[in-house]
Amino acid sequence: MIISIASGKGGTGKTTIAINLALSLPKETVQLIDCDVEEPNSHIFLKPTFHRVTSVGMRVPRIDESKCTYCGKCAQVCEYHAIAVILKNVLVFDELCHGCGACSYLCPEKAIFEVEREIGIIQEGSANGISFINGILNIGEPMASPIIRKAKEGIQKNKITILDAPPGTACPVIETVKGSDFCLLVTEPTPFGLNDLELAVGMLEKLGIQMGIVINKADIGDRGIWDYCKSKNIPILMEIPMDRKIAESYSKGIPIVVENPSYIQRFCDLFEKVEKLHESNRRRPRIE
Ligand code: SF4
Ligand code: SF4
Protein backbone atom coordinates (compact mmCIF):
# COMPACT_ATOMS: atom_id res chain seq x y z
CA MET A 1 0.00 0.00 0.00
CA ILE A 2 1.34 3.43 -0.92
CA ILE A 3 0.37 6.32 1.37
CA SER A 4 1.56 9.79 0.42
CA ILE A 5 1.70 12.57 2.99
CA ALA A 6 1.18 16.00 1.47
CA SER A 7 0.09 19.49 2.43
CA GLY A 8 -0.83 22.49 0.34
CA LYS A 9 1.35 24.61 2.59
CA GLY A 10 4.85 24.20 4.01
CA GLY A 11 5.41 23.97 7.77
CA THR A 12 2.17 22.16 8.63
CA GLY A 13 3.87 19.06 10.06
CA LYS A 14 3.83 16.78 7.02
CA THR A 15 7.23 15.26 7.77
CA THR A 16 6.23 14.81 11.42
CA ILE A 17 3.24 12.70 10.33
CA ALA A 18 5.30 10.70 7.80
CA ILE A 19 8.06 9.85 10.28
CA ASN A 20 5.85 9.07 13.25
CA LEU A 21 3.51 6.93 11.17
CA ALA A 22 6.52 4.97 9.88
CA LEU A 23 7.95 4.55 13.39
CA SER A 24 4.61 3.38 14.83
CA LEU A 25 4.09 0.45 12.42
CA PRO A 26 6.03 -2.85 12.55
CA LYS A 27 9.37 -1.71 11.16
CA GLU A 28 9.94 -4.66 8.81
CA THR A 29 6.66 -3.83 7.03
CA VAL A 30 7.42 -0.14 6.38
CA GLN A 31 9.32 1.87 3.85
CA LEU A 32 9.72 5.65 3.96
CA ILE A 33 10.71 7.65 0.88
CA ASP A 34 11.53 11.32 1.34
CA CYS A 35 10.36 12.91 -1.91
CA ASP A 36 10.86 16.46 -0.65
CA VAL A 37 14.06 16.43 -2.68
CA GLU A 38 14.72 20.18 -2.50
CA GLU A 39 14.75 20.09 1.28
CA PRO A 40 14.76 16.51 2.56
CA ASN A 41 14.67 16.34 6.36
CA SER A 42 13.25 12.92 7.32
CA HIS A 43 16.83 11.67 7.78
CA ILE A 44 17.35 14.15 10.64
CA PHE A 45 14.75 12.26 12.68
CA LEU A 46 15.41 8.72 11.46
CA LYS A 47 19.22 8.90 11.41
CA PRO A 48 19.52 6.18 8.74
CA THR A 49 22.64 4.45 7.49
CA PHE A 50 22.97 4.33 3.71
CA HIS A 51 24.35 1.41 1.76
CA ARG A 52 23.91 2.82 -1.73
CA VAL A 53 24.17 6.23 -3.38
CA THR A 54 23.10 6.60 -7.01
CA SER A 55 23.64 9.60 -9.23
CA VAL A 56 20.54 10.85 -11.08
CA GLY A 57 21.12 12.57 -14.38
CA MET A 58 19.22 14.10 -17.24
CA ARG A 59 20.12 13.94 -20.90
CA VAL A 60 20.77 17.40 -22.30
CA PRO A 61 21.71 18.39 -25.87
CA ARG A 62 25.13 19.32 -27.20
CA ILE A 63 25.82 20.64 -30.68
CA ASP A 64 28.22 19.22 -33.25
CA GLU A 65 29.29 22.51 -34.82
CA SER A 66 30.79 20.70 -37.82
CA LYS A 67 27.30 19.56 -38.87
CA CYS A 68 25.14 22.50 -37.71
CA THR A 69 23.81 24.90 -40.36
CA TYR A 70 22.32 27.29 -37.75
CA CYS A 71 18.88 26.82 -39.25
CA GLY A 72 17.18 27.54 -35.88
CA LYS A 73 14.84 24.53 -35.99
CA CYS A 74 16.00 23.29 -32.56
CA ALA A 75 15.18 26.64 -30.93
CA GLN A 76 11.75 26.66 -32.61
CA VAL A 77 10.78 23.20 -31.35
CA CYS A 78 11.97 23.67 -27.77
CA GLU A 79 8.88 24.34 -25.65
CA TYR A 80 11.06 25.44 -22.74
CA HIS A 81 13.26 28.02 -24.52
CA ALA A 82 16.32 26.02 -23.56
CA ILE A 83 18.06 26.55 -26.93
CA ALA A 84 18.74 29.82 -28.73
CA VAL A 85 20.38 30.20 -32.13
CA ILE A 86 22.08 33.57 -32.48
CA LEU A 87 23.91 34.14 -35.75
CA LYS A 88 26.46 31.31 -35.83
CA ASN A 89 26.03 30.27 -32.23
CA VAL A 90 23.75 27.67 -30.68
CA LEU A 91 23.33 28.28 -26.96
CA VAL A 92 21.98 25.54 -24.69
CA PHE A 93 20.61 26.54 -21.26
CA ASP A 94 20.95 23.31 -19.32
CA GLU A 95 18.85 24.45 -16.36
CA LEU A 96 15.84 25.12 -18.60
CA CYS A 97 16.11 21.83 -20.51
CA HIS A 98 13.51 19.17 -19.63
CA GLY A 99 15.43 16.44 -21.48
CA CYS A 100 12.52 15.75 -23.84
CA GLY A 101 14.82 15.00 -26.79
CA ALA A 102 12.69 16.92 -29.33
CA CYS A 103 15.58 19.07 -30.55
CA SER A 104 17.91 16.17 -31.33
CA TYR A 105 15.06 14.19 -32.91
CA LEU A 106 14.04 17.05 -35.18
CA CYS A 107 17.44 18.54 -36.10
CA PRO A 108 17.58 18.13 -39.91
CA GLU A 109 21.39 17.80 -39.88
CA LYS A 110 21.57 15.30 -36.99
CA ALA A 111 23.95 17.81 -35.42
CA ILE A 112 22.66 17.30 -31.86
CA PHE A 113 23.90 14.62 -29.51
CA GLU A 114 23.02 14.19 -25.85
CA VAL A 115 25.15 14.02 -22.73
CA GLU A 116 24.19 13.02 -19.20
CA ARG A 117 24.23 15.80 -16.61
CA GLU A 118 23.92 15.00 -12.89
CA ILE A 119 21.07 16.85 -11.17
CA GLY A 120 21.00 15.01 -7.84
CA ILE A 121 21.40 11.73 -6.00
CA ILE A 122 19.36 8.95 -4.41
CA GLN A 123 20.47 7.49 -1.09
CA GLU A 124 19.16 4.07 -0.06
CA GLY A 125 19.49 2.59 3.37
CA SER A 126 17.63 1.79 6.56
CA ALA A 127 16.84 3.31 9.90
CA ASN A 128 16.34 0.84 12.75
CA GLY A 129 14.93 -1.72 10.32
CA ILE A 130 12.76 0.74 8.39
CA SER A 131 13.68 0.79 4.72
CA PHE A 132 14.54 4.38 3.78
CA ILE A 133 15.16 6.27 0.52
CA ASN A 134 16.22 9.88 0.31
CA GLY A 135 16.20 11.96 -2.87
CA ILE A 136 18.46 15.02 -2.98
CA LEU A 137 18.34 17.62 -5.74
CA ASN A 138 21.63 19.44 -6.33
CA ILE A 139 21.63 23.06 -5.15
CA GLY A 140 20.51 25.43 -7.90
CA GLU A 141 18.84 22.72 -10.01
CA PRO A 142 15.23 23.57 -10.84
CA MET A 143 13.91 20.14 -11.89
CA ALA A 144 12.85 17.99 -8.93
CA SER A 145 10.60 15.52 -10.77
CA PRO A 146 13.34 13.25 -12.26
CA ILE A 147 14.79 12.71 -8.76
CA ILE A 148 11.35 11.92 -7.34
CA ARG A 149 10.65 9.47 -10.20
CA LYS A 150 13.97 7.75 -9.51
CA ALA A 151 13.31 7.59 -5.75
CA LYS A 152 9.88 6.04 -6.40
CA GLU A 153 11.46 3.32 -8.54
CA GLY A 154 12.61 1.94 -5.17
CA ILE A 155 9.04 1.32 -3.95
CA GLN A 156 8.78 -2.19 -2.51
CA LYS A 157 5.35 -3.60 -3.31
CA ASN A 158 5.28 -5.93 -0.30
CA LYS A 159 5.62 -3.02 2.16
CA ILE A 160 3.59 -0.08 3.40
CA THR A 161 5.31 2.73 1.53
CA ILE A 162 5.06 6.19 3.02
CA LEU A 163 5.94 9.03 0.64
CA ASP A 164 6.84 12.35 2.25
CA ALA A 165 5.82 14.83 -0.48
CA PRO A 166 7.18 18.34 -1.03
CA PRO A 167 4.88 21.19 0.07
CA GLY A 168 2.54 22.93 -2.38
CA THR A 169 0.60 21.65 -5.37
CA ALA A 170 3.13 22.01 -8.19
CA CYS A 171 4.77 19.35 -10.40
CA PRO A 172 7.00 17.75 -7.70
CA VAL A 173 3.95 17.11 -5.49
CA ILE A 174 1.97 15.65 -8.37
CA GLU A 175 4.96 13.45 -9.29
CA THR A 176 5.06 12.22 -5.67
CA VAL A 177 1.37 11.54 -5.04
CA LYS A 178 0.43 10.02 -8.39
CA GLY A 179 0.03 6.28 -8.08
CA SER A 180 -0.69 6.50 -4.34
CA ASP A 181 -3.46 4.39 -2.85
CA PHE A 182 -4.25 7.08 -0.32
CA CYS A 183 -3.08 10.62 0.41
CA LEU A 184 -3.05 12.14 3.89
CA LEU A 185 -3.27 15.91 3.71
CA VAL A 186 -1.78 17.62 6.73
CA THR A 187 -3.16 21.05 7.52
CA GLU A 188 -3.61 23.56 10.31
CA PRO A 189 -6.78 25.48 11.20
CA THR A 190 -5.89 28.93 9.90
CA PRO A 191 -7.20 30.84 6.87
CA PHE A 192 -3.86 30.15 5.08
CA GLY A 193 -4.12 26.48 5.98
CA LEU A 194 -7.65 26.31 4.60
CA ASN A 195 -6.76 28.12 1.38
CA ASP A 196 -3.86 25.77 0.66
CA LEU A 197 -5.87 22.72 1.71
CA GLU A 198 -8.53 23.62 -0.87
CA LEU A 199 -5.83 23.72 -3.57
CA ALA A 200 -4.42 20.36 -2.45
CA VAL A 201 -7.88 18.77 -2.38
CA GLY A 202 -8.53 20.08 -5.91
CA MET A 203 -5.28 18.49 -7.08
CA LEU A 204 -6.11 15.10 -5.55
CA GLU A 205 -9.64 15.18 -6.97
CA LYS A 206 -8.20 15.74 -10.45
CA LEU A 207 -5.77 12.84 -9.95
CA GLY A 208 -8.56 10.63 -8.55
CA ILE A 209 -6.65 9.86 -5.32
CA GLN A 210 -8.56 8.99 -2.16
CA MET A 211 -7.73 11.33 0.72
CA GLY A 212 -8.11 12.02 4.42
CA ILE A 213 -7.08 14.95 6.61
CA VAL A 214 -4.76 15.28 9.60
CA ILE A 215 -5.20 18.55 11.49
CA ASN A 216 -2.08 19.69 13.27
CA LYS A 217 -2.21 22.34 16.02
CA ALA A 218 -5.92 21.55 16.08
CA ASP A 219 -6.71 23.78 19.05
CA ILE A 220 -5.58 27.06 17.45
CA GLY A 221 -7.29 29.19 14.79
CA ASP A 222 -10.87 28.75 13.64
CA ARG A 223 -13.30 25.99 12.56
CA GLY A 224 -12.99 26.65 8.81
CA ILE A 225 -11.16 23.35 8.12
CA TRP A 226 -13.85 21.28 9.86
CA ASP A 227 -16.66 23.08 7.98
CA TYR A 228 -14.85 22.65 4.67
CA CYS A 229 -14.16 18.93 5.22
CA LYS A 230 -17.81 18.40 6.17
CA SER A 231 -19.03 20.20 3.05
CA LYS A 232 -16.69 18.10 0.86
CA ASN A 233 -17.30 14.87 2.79
CA ILE A 234 -13.56 14.42 3.40
CA PRO A 235 -12.79 12.43 6.57
CA ILE A 236 -10.70 14.01 9.32
CA LEU A 237 -8.61 11.10 10.55
CA MET A 238 -6.45 12.62 13.25
CA GLU A 239 -6.14 15.81 15.27
CA ILE A 240 -2.91 16.78 17.04
CA PRO A 241 -3.08 19.60 19.57
CA MET A 242 -0.68 22.50 19.77
CA ASP A 243 1.84 21.18 22.28
CA ARG A 244 5.02 22.93 23.32
CA LYS A 245 6.66 19.56 24.12
CA ILE A 246 6.04 18.32 20.54
CA ALA A 247 7.56 21.53 19.14
CA GLU A 248 10.58 21.23 21.42
CA SER A 249 11.24 17.59 20.53
CA TYR A 250 10.82 18.45 16.82
CA SER A 251 13.43 21.18 17.14
CA LYS A 252 15.83 18.62 18.66
CA GLY A 253 15.17 16.09 15.87
CA ILE A 254 13.26 13.72 18.20
CA PRO A 255 10.07 12.11 16.78
CA ILE A 256 6.84 12.49 18.83
CA VAL A 257 6.52 8.73 19.33
CA VAL A 258 9.98 8.60 20.90
CA GLU A 259 9.33 11.57 23.17
CA ASN A 260 5.79 10.47 24.01
CA PRO A 261 5.14 6.73 23.27
CA SER A 262 1.39 7.13 23.89
CA TYR A 263 1.29 8.54 20.36
CA ILE A 264 2.27 5.15 18.88
CA GLN A 265 -1.28 3.86 19.32
CA ARG A 266 -2.71 7.07 17.84
CA PHE A 267 -0.61 6.64 14.70
CA CYS A 268 -1.55 2.95 14.49
CA ASP A 269 -5.21 4.02 14.69
CA LEU A 270 -4.57 6.51 11.90
CA PHE A 271 -3.15 3.75 9.72
CA GLU A 272 -6.11 1.47 10.48
CA LYS A 273 -8.54 4.21 9.43
CA VAL A 274 -6.63 4.72 6.18
CA GLU A 275 -6.62 0.98 5.50
CA LYS A 276 -10.38 0.68 6.16
CA LEU A 277 -11.25 3.65 3.96
CA HIS A 278 -9.03 2.33 1.18
CA GLU A 279 -10.56 -1.13 1.42
CA SER A 280 -14.14 0.17 1.34
CA ASN A 281 -13.27 2.38 -1.62
CA ARG A 282 -11.78 -0.59 -3.47
CA ARG A 283 -14.95 -2.61 -2.92
CA ARG A 284 -17.24 0.17 -4.10
CA PRO A 285 -18.78 -0.68 -7.48
CA ARG A 286 -17.35 1.51 -10.25
CA ILE A 287 -19.69 3.51 -12.51
CA GLU A 288 -18.06 3.69 -15.95
S1 SF4 B 1 18.36 22.31 -35.69
FE1 SF4 B 1 20.37 21.32 -35.87
S2 SF4 B 1 21.27 22.29 -37.63
FE2 SF4 B 1 19.59 23.59 -37.03
S3 SF4 B 1 20.51 25.10 -35.65
FE3 SF4 B 1 19.79 23.45 -34.37
S4 SF4 B 1 21.55 22.11 -34.16
FE4 SF4 B 1 21.98 23.41 -35.87
S1 SF4 C 1 15.80 18.25 -24.96
FE1 SF4 C 1 13.77 19.22 -25.11
S2 SF4 C 1 13.79 20.72 -23.47
FE2 SF4 C 1 15.91 20.16 -23.80
S3 SF4 C 1 16.67 21.66 -25.23
FE3 SF4 C 1 15.96 19.92 -26.45
S4 SF4 C 1 13.84 20.41 -26.99
FE4 SF4 C 1 14.46 21.79 -25.32
Image: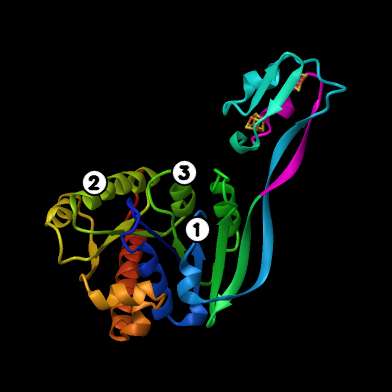
User: Dividing the image into 4 quarters, which one contains the N terminus?
Assistant: bottom left
Question: Mark 1 = which residue?
Answer: 35
Q: Is residue 42 left or right of residue 222?
A: right
- Measured along the vertical axis of the image, is residue 71 above or below residue 131? above
Q: Is residue 160 visible?
A: no
| Number of dots carrying numbers | 3
Q: Is residue 48 left or right of residue 15?
A: right
Between 161 and 73, the residue placed more toward the observer is 73
Indicate the quadrant where residue 13 lies. Answer: bottom left
Question: Mark 3 = which residue?
Answer: 171
User: Dividing the image into 4 quarters, which one contains the C terminus?
Assistant: top left
Circle 1: is it few (<14), some (14-19), or many (20+) Cα within 10 Å?
A: many
Percent x, y of residue 92 = 68, 30
Between 183 and 85, the residue placed more toward the observer is 85
User: Which region shows up in magenta?
Assistant: 100-118
Mark with earlier residue (2, 3): 3
Mark with earlier residue (1, 2): 1
Question: Mark 2 = which residue?
Answer: 195
Percent x, y of residue 11 = 33, 58
Q: Amino acid at mark 3?
A: Cys
Indicate the quadrant where residue 91 lies. Answer: top right
Indicate the quadrant where residue 180 lies. Answer: bottom left
Q: Amino acid at mark 2?
A: Asn
Mark with earlier residue (3, 1): 1
User: Is 276 contained in the magenta span?
Assistant: no
The residue lying furthest to the bottom in this view is 261
Percent x, y of residue 8 = 33, 50
Q: What's the mark number on residue 111?
A: none
| SS assignment at label 3 | helix
Q: Amino acid at mark 1?
A: Cys
